Image: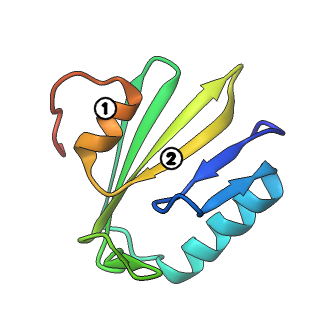
Amino acid sequence: LDPDVTWQGLREGWVCHGPDEVIDTLQQGLEQRRDVSALEFIRAGDRVVMGVRGPALDHIDGEPLGGQIFNVFTLRNGRIIRIEDHRLQAEALQSAGVEGDPGWR
């Protein structure tokens, strides 16, 4: 992780700054949602879209997810500088600059 990494959650106020906050949030999420049924990664230049599907992904703090969430990781010099959460694959792909709909494989 880059020392200046930022993680933008689904809500505007859900933001983590710096590696410590990002790792703490990730650990909390993993403790609550360990059951994952599918992972998909799509690379788009300096961005990677990660789709996660699982039965425990029904909501995060009242925000409905419908069993899946999509993260966009932005990389610089091999380090993650930004993470963005998205409910829909189309939103994540647009954020990452991916053309078309690759769909779940």
Q: Residue 23 occupies which quadrant of the picture?
A: bottom right
Q: Nearer the viewer, residue 54 or 64?
A: 64
Where does residue 53 sit, x and y in percent of width and height? 30, 63
Q: Is residue 103 above or below residue 11?
A: above
Q: Residues within 10 Å of mark 2 (few under 14, many from 20)?
A: some
On-image quarter of the N terminus: top right
Residue at 80%, 49% in the rendered image:
18
Q: What's the amino acid at mark 2? A: Glu
Tag 1: residue type? Answer: Gln
**Residue name at image x 56 percent, y 31 percent:** 74
Residue 100: image quadrant is top left
Q: Which residue is mark 2?
A: 84
Q: Earlier in the sequence, mark 1 or mark 2?
A: 2
> Residue 69 at x, y = what percent?
36, 59
- Measured in 3D between alpha carbons, the distance from the residue under mark 1 to the one under mark 2, in whole angstroms, is 12 Å
In x, y percent, where is residue 80? 66, 36
Numbered circle sitting on residue 94? 1
